[in-house]
Amino acid sequence: MQPSAVPELAHTHTRPVHWVATAAAIAGVVALSSALQPGSATAAQPAPGTEAGTAPAAAAPPSTTGVHFPLDCGPVKALVVKKATGDLDGDGTPETVAVVHCDAPMGTPPDGVYVLTRGAAGAPARVVATLVDPKDRHTVTDFALDAGTVTATLLGYSTADVPSCCPDLKTPTSWRWNGTAFIRSTPTPAHSV
């Protein structure tokens, strides 16, 4: 065997620290590239004599933080269990729809469904409509907001004698803004569970 003319270089042997450094560098490049994305492309060209500008930033939907919901929870707090955002009235500004109930230590408290809009500058969002009143003893399932329509399935009770643990009615329901109020529609009659 002929000896190499070039002495063996110690730094050419990989060690775990080299792999860790390489992985960290690659992770940094991936993170940086995901944060620095180019603007979205459009096929439309600006009209002659006008400058291409950026569209105004979309308004953030109202937050449920700090909102006083019209719900009497006594010593426990109100708990937002589901929420969805979207433009319900077509004004270009999103609203938030929240399903809220009391944070009871036992049982399943009834839900309320509330529509929130942005509050004054620096103020929390405000409730502008109640779609489901907790006094009606409904539990909300299958909750969604799509194309300006709020949909949910309401679990309820046929009489006051039905125990709270066991709702016996299931009603698919939707609400849509008609320009002055939210109109509720129930596509199929309520049926027993």
Image: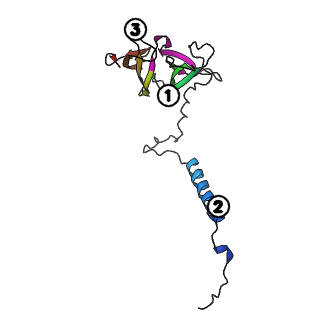
Q: Which residue is mark 1?
A: 85
Residue 168 or residue 177, whichever sits in front = 168
Which comes before the other along the chain, label 3 or label 2?
Answer: 2
Q: Are marks 3 and 2 in contact (CB under 8 Å)?
A: no
Question: Which image quarter is the C terminus in?
Answer: top left
> How much space separates mark 3 and mark 2, taking CA atoms?
68 Å
The residue depicted at 61 percent of the width and 63 percent of the height is: 19
| Residue 159: numbered disc | 3
User: Counting other residues with Cα less than 10 Å from the Cα at mark 2, is it few (<14), some (14-19), or many (20 or more)?
Assistant: few
Q: Which residue is outermost to the bottom?
A: 2
Callout 1 secondary element:
strand
| Residue 20: numbered disc | none
Q: Nearer the viewer, mark 1 or mark 2?
A: 2
Is residue 132 found inside the magenta-colored segment of the image? yes
Residue 174 image position (x, y, % from top left): 39, 20
Q: Are marks 1 and 2 in contact (CB under 8 Å)?
A: no
Report the side of 151 relative to 135 (left or right): left
The magenta stretch is: 116-139
Q: Nearer the viewer, mark 3 or mark 2?
A: 3
Q: Which residue is mark 2?
A: 21
